[in-house]
Image (cartoon, rainbow, N blue to C red):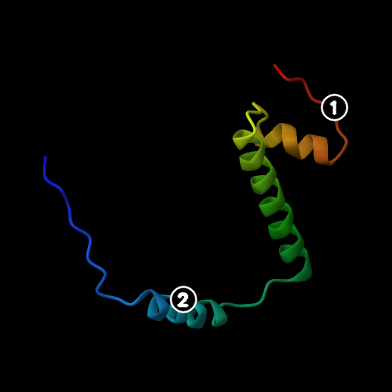
Amino acid sequence: MKIKKTTRSVDPLSKLVDLQITTSELPQLSPLEKAQLDHALAIEQLYYSSKVEGSNLTKEMIDKAIHGKKFSAA
């Protein structure tokens, strides 16, 4: 088994600056797109935090719970 050595030839701060420049050049999201992205991120965060706490809820179950819809745990 070969062990791959990682080298950090690029300074992490330089990588961050490059990433910020790249993202600043992307087109702006519409208000609807921003709301949809925020909603998806909230569901992701709830899903993974519930997993850490030992829950077996799926993303779909969490989404239904957020919107007050009934769901079965089966």
User: What is the three-letter code of the residue carrying label 2?
Assistant: Leu
Q: Quadrant of the C terminus?
A: top right
Where's residue 53, x and y in %? 65, 33
Judged left or right of residue 35, residue 67 is right
Judged left or right of residue 70, residue 52 is left
Residue 70 versus residue 12: which sits nearer the camera?
A: 12
Where's residue 29, x and y in %? 68, 71
Q: Quadrant of the N terminus?
A: top left
Where's residue 41, x and y in %? 67, 53
Residue 11 versus residue 31: which sits nearer the camera?
A: 11
Q: Which residue corresponds to the image point at 88% horizontal and 36% vertical from the top-left?
A: 68
Judged left or right of residue 3, residue 63 is right
Q: Is residue 33 above or below residue 74?
A: below
The image shows a total of numbered marks equal to 2
Neighbours of disc 2 within 10 Å: few (<14), some (14-19), many (20+) = few
Where's residue 50, x and y in %? 67, 36
Rounded to the nearest angstrom, the CA distance separating label 2 from label 1 is 41 Å
Judged left or right of residue 70, residue 41 is left
In the displayed image of the protein, which residue is found farthest to the left?
1
Q: Is residue 26 above or below residue 65?
A: below
Q: Which residue corresponds to the image point at 77% horizontal and 64% vertical from the top-left?
A: 32
Neighbours of disc 1 within 10 Å: few (<14), some (14-19), many (20+) = few
In the displayed image of the protein, which residue is found farthest to the right?
68
Pointers 2 and 1 in contact (C-beta within 8 Å): no
User: What is the three-letter code of the residue carrying label 1?
Assistant: Lys
Give the label, 2 or 1, closer to the camera. Answer: 2
Q: Which mark is residue 19?
A: 2
Q: Pick whichever of labels 2 and 1 is earlier in the sequence.
A: 2
Q: Element under label 2?
A: helix
Residue labelled with disc 1 = 70
